[in-house]
Amino acid sequence: MADLPERTASDHNEEIMHATYRALCEHGYADLTIKRIAAEYGKSTAAIHYHYDTKEDLLAAYLDYLLDRFVATIKDIETTDPEARLELLLDKLLVKPNEYPDLVVSMLEMGAQAPYKQSFRERFQQHDEYVRYTLKAVINHGIDEGVFGDVDATHAARTLMTIIDGARTRAVVLDDTEAFPTARRMADEYISTIRAVEESTDS
């Protein structure tokens, strides 16, 4: 079982987040308990409850933690070239998840609870909005730089998100090992149509 990438357990909360990840991957959302998280943490359930009153509180914090880590990886992308930046974003969204299949499963399980748990729904919405905003900003930058054609950046970002979400679902529900590579190719094909629009206007 894979661990979270770039593990750095520098404080108690960091250790609890890693323990939550391992317990989710091992048991899934349905069978997840504070006791099982505590076992991964190596301490008593009281040590968990000292920081979080309920399992839902802990998992809401876990979603915040994952979002913060994702935002940090986006900020670490150094290139400002819009096409290169878009490619690197898609790598993180459609290549990296394939390296951590247990994490994809646990996130989809938690996402299925979003209609019933407002704290989960709010965080998944926040994550989705952030990713769509980032994709849209990169596409708009590409339009301004003449890299992409005069396309609807909002629609383009939603299209890419639909490809991403479809891959995640197929990978988990159907155990489709080709879901992420196929989606990555689909994303490249879609980006090609954006470039083609720009090229056709120049002719």
Image: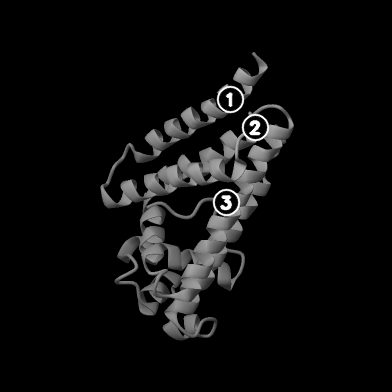
**Element carrying mark 1:** helix
Residue identifier under label 2: 150
* Residue under the image location 58 percent in, 25 percent down: 197
Marked residue nearer the N-terminal end (2 or 3): 3
Real-space Cα distance between discs 2 and 3? 21 Å
Q: Quadrant of the C terminus?
A: top right
User: At 68% from the left edge and 48% from the top edge, which residue is drawn?
Assistant: 75
- Looking at the picture, which amino acid does disc 3 mark? Val
Amino acid at pointer 1: Val
Residue contact at pointers 2 and 3, CB within 8 angstroms: no
Image depth: mark 1 or mark 3 in front: 1
Residue under pointer 1: 197
How many labels sit on residues? 3
**Mark 2 and mark 1: span between their CA atoms?**
7 Å
- Label 2 crowd bin: few (<14), some (14–19), many (20+), radius 10 Å: some
Residue placed under numbered mark 3 in the picture: 131
- Residue at position x 62%, y 44% in the image: 136
